[in-house]
Structure formats: structure tokens, C-alpha cells
Amino acid sequence: MVKKRSMRAFLILLVGIVVGAAAVWIYGTRQGKSAVHATGEQIESATKSARDTVQEKLRVLDLRPEQVKEDLARTGQVVRRRTREAGQAIADATADARVTTAIKGKLVANKDLSALSISVNTTGGVVTLSGTVSTPEDISKAMLLAMETDGVKEVVSTLQVKPPNKKG
């Protein structure tokens, strides 16, 4: 069990190093800097969305103390049930962020797909891929990559095929 955890931690560290190295390389180009900025905004947006979802679920739990006392005296279950719902909401938002991050990491590691031109959004385990790719085959590759990620229930693609500009 300890070996398995150590191996998992090592693999996560290795993926992090690879993603970091790719990010440094990509950031070195002017186009990369603007793409990294856009990706940062996308991650910030996903984080804000997850935070807003959690805050909304927690707002529902805003019960008056008198109500809590009455419900506890009557059934003893209201607080536990609602706490479990809040825990589930937090777990769902965290799981969505984890899925999005895992897919973005796979896109960065994939030499055939551009992580900078594919946007990933996850809500309730449903992944939406948007942006542009070079070929219809790249849409299939991106969807397969997403579908093979733990926690994904469904993948929706709005990816558009846009052949790369020919320089010459």
C-alpha cells in the first residue's frame, strides 16, 4: 500500500515536472505568453465557477438557530443530512476542478493536440471541449483523451476544425 502511494506520488510529481517544463517552453514564445494568459483566465474562471457553486450550496444551509434546535429535538437528522449535502457539493466542485486539470495535463503532454487551443470545462462530471483543432481526427483524439479520465461521465465537443496557417 505504501509502495503504491509512493509510486502514485512519484508519477504525479513526474507529470508536474513535465507540465512545468512544457509551460516554460511554451511561455518563451510571444504567442505562448498570450495563450498562457488565456489559459490562466480559463482556469481562474473554472475556479470561480466551482467556488460560486460551493457558495450557493452553503447559502442553502443558512438555517436560523431556532430552526436547527427544533429540527434536532424532533428528528436529530437535519444537520447531518444537510452537512452531507454540503460535503457532496464541495466534493463535486473539487472533482470537477480535478477532472479539468487532469485533462489539461493530458493535452499538454500530447504532442498531437494543442492544450493552448482547446478549452476544457467540467460541470457535474460532464466535460465540454471547445476551441480549434487541425483535423477531425484531432477531435476524436481529444474526446478519447477526455473520456479516459477518471470522474468523466460525458464529453461534449464544440471543437472546430481550423487547419494550421501555412507559412511560405
Image: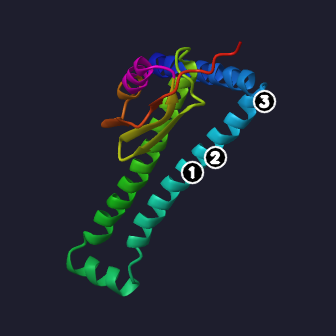
Q: Check the image and report above or below for 146 versus 62.
A: above
Q: Which residue matches tag 2?
A: 41
In 3D space, how far apart are the residues under numbered discs 3 and 2 (Cα atoms)? 17 Å
Pointers 3 and 2 in contact (CB under 8 A)? no
Color style of the picture: rainbow
* Element type where label 3 sits in the image: helix
- Give the position of the N terminus as an image quadrant: top left
In 3D space, how far apart are the residues under numbered discs 1 and 2 (Cα atoms)? 6 Å
Q: Which residue matches tag 3?
A: 30
The residue at 46%/59% (across/down) is 54
- Residue 81: which quarter of the image? bottom left
Bin the neighbour count of mark 3 within 10 Å (Cα to Cα): few under 14, some 14-19, many 20 and up: few
Q: Which residue matches tag 1?
A: 45
Work out whether residue 125 or residue 127 is closer to the camera in this orientation and state it.
127
Residue 139 spot, x, y in % from top left: 41, 24
The residue at 52%/27% (across/down) is 162
Extent of the magenta region: 134-144
Residue 89 spot, x, y in % from top left: 38, 55
Work out whether residue 168 or residue 19 is closer to the camera in this orientation and state it.
168
Magenta: main secondary structure equals: helix
Bin the neighbour count of mark 2 within 10 Å (Cα to Cα): few under 14, some 14-19, many 20 and up: few
